[in-house]
Image (cartoon, rainbow, N blue to C red):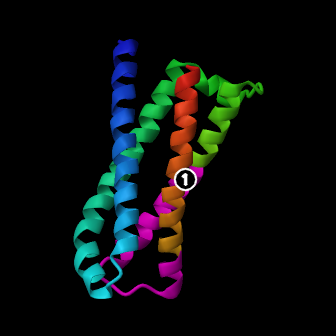
């Protein structure tokens, strides 16, 4: 039974990672190219909530399936007791990045949810945009360490 769960966890993790990163790239490009304030006010209130809830579900599934695979492959032991090996180093770096990414996602989601369709304060605007940029770039580094781990395993 455990092998069945782990195989499904891997596939779900992969699909959610593709969705998460692809969505992040799409929203990043949309944010850069959609400069007209009126167009932003027409687009974001519609796609933002759908994307936001999808991203929250994706993040929960990514964290859950990552934890399941971490247990199955004994990576949790390595994470909790690092030994300086390449897998230990990559796992530590990925875990730190995922933790920061999770916090940035929560910050971004809360601000976006509370201000959807409303004018943001300068602080909300700064936090929303900076967390969005941070999420985008952290995704690339998390993906790098995921590839490193997969190559080692």
Q: Identify the residue shown where x is 34% and y is 15%.
A: 4
**Above or below for 66 versus 34:** above
Name the side, left or right, on which 61 lies relative to 130. Answer: left
Q: Is residue 24 magenta?
A: no
Place of residue 129 in the rendered image (x, y in percent of width and height, measured from the top left) = 48, 72
In the picture of the structure, the residue carrying the numbered disc 1 is 138
Name the side, left or right, on which 65 lies relative to 134. Answer: left
**Above or below for 47 versus 65:** below
Mark 1, secondary structure of its residue:
helix
List the single residue furthest toward the right. 84
Residue range (magenta): 99-126
**Above or below for 19 versus 28:** above
Q: Identify the residue shown where x is 55% and y is 19%.
A: 153
Q: Identify the residue shown where x is 33% and y is 24%.
A: 8
List the single residue furthest toward the front. 33
- Magenta portion: prevailing SS class: helix
**Above or below for 84 versus 55:** above
């Amino acid at each position: 039974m455990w092998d069945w769960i782990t195989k499904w966890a891997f596939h779900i993790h992969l699909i959610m990672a593709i969705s998460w990163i692809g969505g992040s790239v799409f929203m990043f490009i949309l944010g850069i190219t959609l400069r007209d304030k009126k167009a932003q006010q027409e687009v974001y209130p519609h796609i933002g909530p759908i994307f936001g809830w999808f991203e929250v579900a994706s993040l929960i599934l990514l964290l859950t399936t990552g934890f399941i695979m971490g247990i199955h492959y004994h990576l949790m032991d390595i994470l909790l007791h690092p030994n300086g090996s390449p897998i230990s180093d990559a796992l530590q770096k990925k875990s730190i990045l995922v933790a920061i990414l999770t916090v940035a996602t929560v910050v971004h989601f809360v601000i976006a949810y509370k201000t959807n369709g409303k004018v943001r304060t300068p602080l909300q605007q700064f936090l929303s945009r900076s967390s969005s940029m941070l999420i985008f770039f952290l995704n690339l580094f998390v993906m790098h360490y995921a590839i490193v781990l997969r190559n080692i395993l």
